[in-house]
Image (spheres, coloured by chain):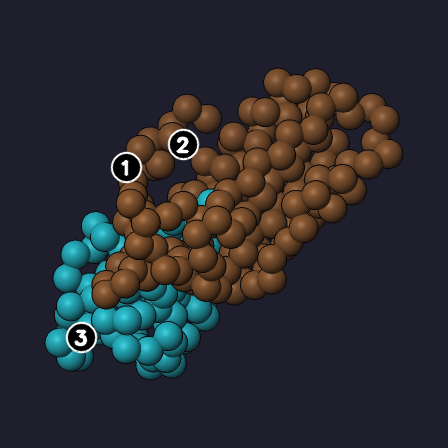
Amino acid sequence: MEVLYFAWVRERIGLPRETVETGAETVRQLIDELRSREARYEAAFADLSALRVALDQELSDFDATLSGVREVAFFPPMTGG
Amino acid sequence: MRISVQREPFDLGAEADSFARGATDMGAVVTFTGVVRDAPGGGLRAMEIEHYPGMTEKAIRTIAEEAQARWSLGDVLVIHRYGSLVPGERIMMVATAAPHRKDAFEAAEYLMDYLKSRAPFWKKEIGAGEAGWVAAKDEDEAALDRW
């Protein structure tokens, strides 16, 4: 699946998007997988209360299932307007 | 309904002038414009606005459709810019048209409250020597509760 990062999440991880091969069933499992990869992922996902997630461009939550999901995005709380 | 997520500046006068023009049953038109505010005492060189292409347009459309479902609106316009902006530049505008002003004002406030916290934009302030992401405010999240 495609995993996208925005704002400081993108800066900490060092790339805007990547293709991830994963067997994770939920967002939380995907995060655990990413965190175990490298320090920069650990740094980006250290505080989940500072993060939001969108699944196929709809806001979702960390316990949501990834079944059928093609695009996951992680970002801080939005600051539009 | 028109939604535009764009890098280019927009012409506020022309947009306001053409919005809901000719809709003779619309007695009230409200426009709101968001402007890049300088840091207290100056010092903001630029505001960089990042967004999530694809989701941004969908999220704004969902918000605007909800506004149309809640209030009697003749038309809705949302323009939101991204990219690098300087203090004094217009970031965004919303316009609402309704038969009566209460609906137009309330719908415009609703749109603004939701655009702040539910449209995937992120702002980074670039100062003389430092740069930092603008943190979301608790009060902006709390503002959604009144709807």
Chain B: its colour in the image is brown
Could you say whether the residue bearing mark 1 is in a helix, strand or loop? helix
- Please state which amino acid type lies under the numbered disc 1: Asp
Q: In which quarter of the image is residue A67?
A: bottom left
Q: Which amino acid does label 2 sit on?
A: Leu
Q: Which of A33 and B66 is in front in this view?
A: B66
**Quarter of the image that includes the N terminus of chain B:** top right
Asked whether B35 or B99 is in front, the reply is B35
Position of residue B130 in the picture relative to residue A73 (left or right)? left
Give the x, y percent position of residue B47.
Answer: 40, 58
Q: Which amino acid does label 3 sit on?
A: Arg
* Tag 1 subunit: B
**Element at label 2:** helix
Q: Which residue is drawn at 16% across and 56% down?
A: A47
* Mark toward the viewer: 1 or 2: 1
Which residue lies under the disc numbered 2?
Answer: B144
Q: Residues within 10 Å of mark 1 (few under 14, many from 20)?
A: few
Q: Position of residue A78 (x, y in %)?
A: 37, 50
Q: Is residue B113 shown left or right of residue B21?
A: left
Q: What residue would you read off at disc 3?
A: A40
Q: Name the residue under label 1.
A: B138
Q: Chain A is drawn in which colour?
A: cyan
Q: How crowded is mark 3: few (under 14 residues within 10 Å), some or many (20 or more)?
A: some
Q: Mark 2 lies on which chain?
A: B
